């Protein structure tokens, strides 16, 4: 692959505000789950406030990298056997899988809200073992090992 081929591929990349906002929202949702704290979730307004400047920053950084990256990649590919083949194969195999996983994760995240809390096959209640209970209301039942 030549420098011009790399350059042509890199020229096609531009960051769109909605995509960046989606990425920011996913990142902050992950932080919210990681720290078990809802305050990390972005509101619509916060997402808009961060979205536009983040897009500007990412596109600016990309323009600077885009000019240097072909030379770096070419030199790496020339000095590393299999690098060009790996980049090509990864682009063909891994990128579509990642895109599909992102889509599936988004649908999965939305599914519980659309289907309701309980699945139709789930039992309506679970009985605890006989004997005194020390569990507080709302806490999970811990079954004795035996």
Image (spheres, rainbow, N blue to C red):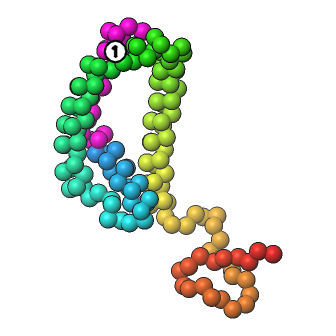
> Residue 80 at what x, y percent from top left?
50, 16
Residue furthest to the bottom in view is: 132
Instruction: Please check the rendered image and state whether residue 3 is part of the magenta-colored stretch, yes or no.
Output: yes
Q: In this rendering, would 59 be left or right of 37?
A: left
> Residue 24 at what x, y percent from top left?
31, 47
Q: Quadrant of residue 124?
A: bottom right
Let me know if residue 85 appears in the view: no
x 34%, y 10%: residue: 3
Q: Main secondary structure of the magenta part?
A: helix
Answer few, some or many: residues within 10 Å of disc 1's Cα (few below 14, many 20 plus, some between 14 and 19). some
> Residue 78 at what x, y percent from top left?
46, 11
Q: Which quarter shows the C terminus?
A: bottom right
x 40%, y 13%: residue: 74
Q: Nearer the viewer, residue 65 or 31?
A: 65
Q: Is residue 51 above or below residue 4?
A: below
Which span is picked out in magenta? Answer: 1-20
Q: Total number of numbered labels? A: 1
Secondary structure of residue under mark 1: helix
> Residue 57 at what x, y percent from top left?
21, 37
Q: Is residue 8 above or below residue 108?
A: above
Instruction: Please check the rendered image and state whether residue 124 is part of the magenta-colored stretch, yes or no.
Output: no
Q: In this rendering, would 121 be left or right of 24?
A: right
Q: Quadrant of residue 132?
A: bottom right
Q: Nearer the viewer, residue 23 or 63?
A: 63
The residue wearing badge 1 is 71
Q: Is residue 134 above or below residue 111?
A: below
x 43%, y 17%: residue: 76
x 41%, y 54%: residue: 30
Let me know if residue 28 appears in the view: yes
């Amino acid at each position: 692959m030549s420098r011009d081929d790399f350059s042509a591929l890199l020229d096609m990349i531009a960051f769109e505000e909605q995509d960046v906002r989606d990425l920011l929202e996913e990142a902050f949702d992950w932080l919210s789950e990681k720290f078990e704290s809802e305050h990390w979730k972005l509101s619509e307004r916060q997402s808009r406030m961060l979205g536009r400047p983040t897009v500007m920053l990412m596109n600016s950084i990309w323009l600077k990298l885009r000019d240097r990256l072909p030379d770096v990649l070419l030199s790496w590919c020339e000095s590393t056997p299999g690098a060009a083949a790996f980049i090509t194969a990864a682009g063909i195999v891994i990128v579509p899988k990642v895109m599909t996983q992102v889509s599936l994760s988004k649908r999965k995240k939305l599914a519980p809200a659309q289907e309701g809390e309980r699945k139709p096959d789930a039992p309506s209640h679970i009985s605890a073992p006989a004997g005194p209970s020390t569990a507080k209301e709302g806490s999970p039942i811990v079954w004795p090992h035996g």
